[in-house]
Amino acid sequence: MFSVYDGVMQAINIRAFYDTPLGETTRRLLAARLAPLLPRAADAVIVGLGLAQPYLTADACGAALALALTPGPLGPAGWPDGADNRMALVDELDLPLPESAVDAALVVHGLELSDSPQDMLHELWRVLAPQGRLIVVAPNRRGLWSSLDASPFGHGQPFSRPQLSRLLNEAQFAVTRFDHALFLPPARQPLLHAAAPMAEWLGSLLWPGASGVMVVEAVKQVYAFAPARRQRRLLPRLPPVLSPQPARRDRG
């Protein structure tokens, strides 16, 4: 578990990363994988958890309502200038949303940075509608990106495909799609960025296990009982006091 200060610095590094040419190439490659998985209808609700804001664009979400929820330790951020703010700091284990209110949840820079990824998934299960979709981008343990500090995917806990599948299944999600992305090394040479689309095509075809990240789509499974989750909140909540209680008198 990292401290609040470390979390804020991590968030600053992530946002600064997307302002670099490597970050823009990363965003473009991942957006091409993620956009087809997001609903676009006007009555759909999409929640991004972690630091998913770079992927919740109007082109990707269409007319859907998109909300960006950032775990408190990762620090504040604002929505793009000129648009209504739809971002909030939250406790990822106690989201400020009612049950079954979300059609799709997108987790980017979230699962690997959480000190309790299983509980995060349980909370996402709670807010997702029946058969709601969960899309997770997570660093691949076998890939080069998870072992280098040149990108945000080199921080936190990487996952193997079996580990991620097991984590989702234990949270009562059924995996429906497993994809791979980011096959070039996280280098800053412009020539490599120009070759990125071709590398994505060849990597998906020949070396899927060597990708930098895994893109997983899963569907909420509804059973008789909701999965148990451990309660944790950033701030303590005091029990409500409805009315003053008279002091009891001891009988002499």
Image (cartoon, rainbow, N blue to C red):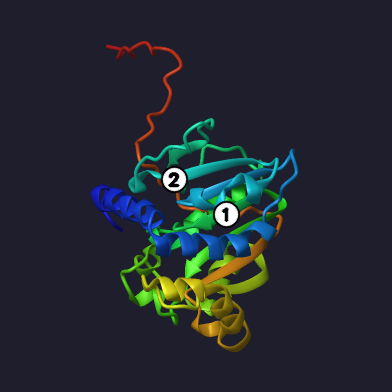
How many residues crowd mark 2 within 10 Å: few (<14), some (14–19), many (20+)? many
In the rendered image, which quarter is residue 245 located in? top left
- Which label's residue is closer to the chain start, 1 or 2? 2
On the image, the x and y values in percent for residue 28 come to 54, 61
The answer to whether the residue labelled 1 contacts the one labelled 2, judged by CB atoms less than 8 Å apart, is no
Q: Quadrant of residue 237?
A: top left
* Three-letter amino acid code of the residue under disc 1: Leu
Frontmost residue, 246 versus 252: 246
Which numbered circle lies on residue 70?
2
Which residue is nearer to you in this view: 94 or 21? 21
**Residue 161 sits above or below residue 225 on the image:** below
Task: Return the residue at label 1.
Answer: 106
In this orientation, which residue lies closer to the viewer: 243 or 235? Answer: 235
Residue 241 seen by the camera = yes
Q: Is residue 103 visible?
A: no
Q: Position of residue 246 (x, y in %)?
A: 37, 10
Looking at the rendered image, the quarter that the C terminus falls into is: top left
Q: Residue at x 32, y 50 (%)?
A: 12
Q: Is residue 77 above or below residue 184?
A: above
Q: Is residue 63 left or right of residue 72?
A: right
Packing grade of label 1 (10 A; few <14, some 14-19, many >=20) is many
How far apart, in angstroms, are the residues tagged by discs 1 and 2? 12 Å
- Image coords of residue 175 (percent x, y): 66, 69
| Looking at the image, residue 169 lies above or below residue 17 | below
Point 46% across, 48% down: residue: 93
